[in-house]
Image (cartoon, grey):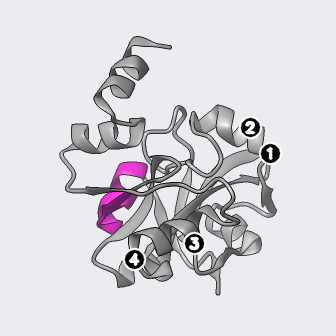
């Protein structure tokens, strides 16, 4: 384990929360007991935290014309791959291989955060996020969410806003 990762683990932080703190961004961490049998990580977070599913966003990694791209969409819906491809300036999008997503982001499936990734990937945030003062996204670990303003998330990830979710 690298020194930086060891320090984060000892302090209880994740690369996502460390990135938020370093940027001076206002955020709130919400922890809950993760159930390994839960069929949907995002819906589990919504229920456990008592936050409406349209305010809890899942982080998905897709392959857009051979380039890994992050899509952040509400857990209440699903990702529209065609819309993501268009928003990312590509022709075709498919879901990324889970192992490639984990290796590239540095997070495990169900705990992938759009923040603090090992390699910064192009990011598209569903435009519905702008309807809320704050949204929740994974803080980099199953059972841990971070709440922040959508514009702050977009700034920190260099994300573009686009309609990429289906309800």
Q: Mark 2 points at which residue?
A: 100
**Is tag 4's residue or tag 2's residue first in the polypeptide sequence?**
4
Q: Residues within 10 Å of mark 1 (few under 14, many from 20)?
A: few
Q: Which of 86 and 58 is in front in this view?
A: 58
Q: How far apart are marks 4 and 2 (CA)?
A: 32 Å
Q: Residue at x 38, y 78 (%)?
A: 130
| Label 3 secondary element | helix
User: Where does the image place residue 101, in percent across and percent down from the top left?
Assistant: 69, 42
Name the N-terminal-most of marks 4 and 3: 3
CA neighbours of label 4 inside 10 A, class few (<14), some (14 to 19), many (20+) = few
Look at the image and say whether residue 149 sits in the magenta stretch: yes
Residue 40 placement: quadrant: bottom right
Helix, strand or loop for disc 4: loop
Q: Where is residue 108 in the image (x, y as percent from the top left)?
A: 62, 41
Residue, disc 1? 97
Residues tagged 1 and 2 counted as in contact (Cβ below 8 A): yes
- Provide the residue designation for mark 3: 43
Q: Magenta segment range?
A: 146-157
Q: Residue at x 69, y 58 (%)?
A: 37
Q: Position of residue 125 (x, y in %)?
A: 50, 66
């Amino acid at each position: 384990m690298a020194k930086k990762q060891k320090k984060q683990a000892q302090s209880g932080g994740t690369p996502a929360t460390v990135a938020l703190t370093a940027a001076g961004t206002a955020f709130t961490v919400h922890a809950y007991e993760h159930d390994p049998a839960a069929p949907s990580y995002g819906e589990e977070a919504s229920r456990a935290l008592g936050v409406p599913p349209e305010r809890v966003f899942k982080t998905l990694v897709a392959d857009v014309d051979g380039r890994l791209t992050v899509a952040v969409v509400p857990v209440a819906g699903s990702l529209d791959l065609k819309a993501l491809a268009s928003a990312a300036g590509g022709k075709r999008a498919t879901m990324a291989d889970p192992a490639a997503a984990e290796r590239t982001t540095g997070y495990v499936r169900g705990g992938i955060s759009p923040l603090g990734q090992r390699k910064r990937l192009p990011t598209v945030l569903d435009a519905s996020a702008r309807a809320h003062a704050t949204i929740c996204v994974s803080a980099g670990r199953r059972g841990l969410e971070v709440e922040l303003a959508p514009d702050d998330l977009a700034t920190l990830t260099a994300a573009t806003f686009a309609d990429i979710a289906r309800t």
